[in-house]
Image (cartoon, rainbow, N blue to C red):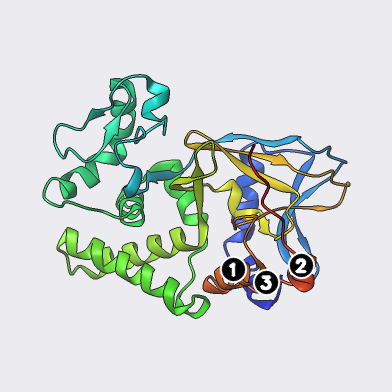
Amino acid sequence: MAAQQDEREQAPGRPRVRRWWQDNGICPPLAVKEKEGRGGGVFTTEDLKCGTEVLPPIAPLACALMSDVRGCYCDYCFKSVEDCGKPLRRCSRCRFAYYCSKACQESDWRSHKHECRVTISKAWLSVMMRLVLRCMHIQGKQKQELDLLRASDDNLLSEGASKDTQNCIHGVLGFLDTDDPATKKKIVDIAYKITFNGFSIHEDELRPIGVGLYTCLSLFNHSCVPNCAAVSDGRKLVVRTVADIKAGEQLVVSYLDPFDTPEQRKLKLTEYGFECDCEMCNTELYPVRRNPQ
């Protein structure tokens, strides 16, 4: 990655993230370390075969379903209504969130109760607005994890991405009806953390259905030719290798659709302050989408 990514990777919070990584028992063969001129990243200390699960299912700090699939998936476990085999139960207060069971509804209440008060009187919230509201009330160990995630500013964002983030900030401020400077600062900080650290959650057919924040994944750098992939398992993500990896090599994931053209990749990466100099971008090659049949 070019200079913009180096700026991201050398942000002050990264040493604390590495300590968090080690303190939470994520051990060899994975190691978090610096690479000269490239910032920090995740490396392996031994050879890894393709298909190796390098990180077990990771629960998100916070996650939310996209608005266009609301009512089709459980708002807590992300199980589809088809997999449930029965209609989802709707929150009786706001009638906005849906759950596959009473257990899921109770498990989600600590996060949902804050958006519930807003959605009682509001008809629509974007996935980013919901995530901001859910993150605002995170406490304890999860709050420490949230503080580790990098939050940047408009200097690294394209006009389009910056506008989306600003619209979210103004929307949440409007819903909460507050002019408190401390609250505004908190909302701004969380919104930018989501912009730079949010990962898409996909269904089985790779359609995005939600967004989540995962502390571990914040250390995996991007490549258009990744050797690892984050695979959705409900609301959790599993990281597996998609190629053989030699000891000492960096583990990288793609932040993009693997079937994007070079032009599409460049546009999406520059929206978030990235420039990529990988082989795929330099040769203008991209995978051919195969017929699923």
Give the alpha-carbon distance from disc 3 to disc 2, as whole Å: 15 Å
> Which of 228/139 is in front?
228
Give the alpha-carbon distance from disc 1 to disc 3, as whole Å: 22 Å
> Which of 185/131 is in front?
131
Instruction: State the image coordinates of residue 234 (x, y, percent, origin top left).
Output: 49, 33
Instruction: State the image coordinates of residue 168 (x, y, percent, origin top left).
Output: 31, 64
Q: Secondary structure at mark 2?
A: loop
- Residue corresponding to mark 2: 278
- Residue corresponding to mark 1: 264
Would residue 219 be found to the left or right of residue 184 on screen? right
Would residue 82 be found to the left or right of residue 39 on screen? left
Instruction: State the image coordinates of residue 96 (x, y, percent, origin top left).
Output: 21, 41
Residue type beneath disc 2: Cys
Would residue 200 be found to the left or right of residue 10 on screen? left
Q: Secondary structure at mark 1?
A: helix
Camera-nearest label, 2 or 1: 1
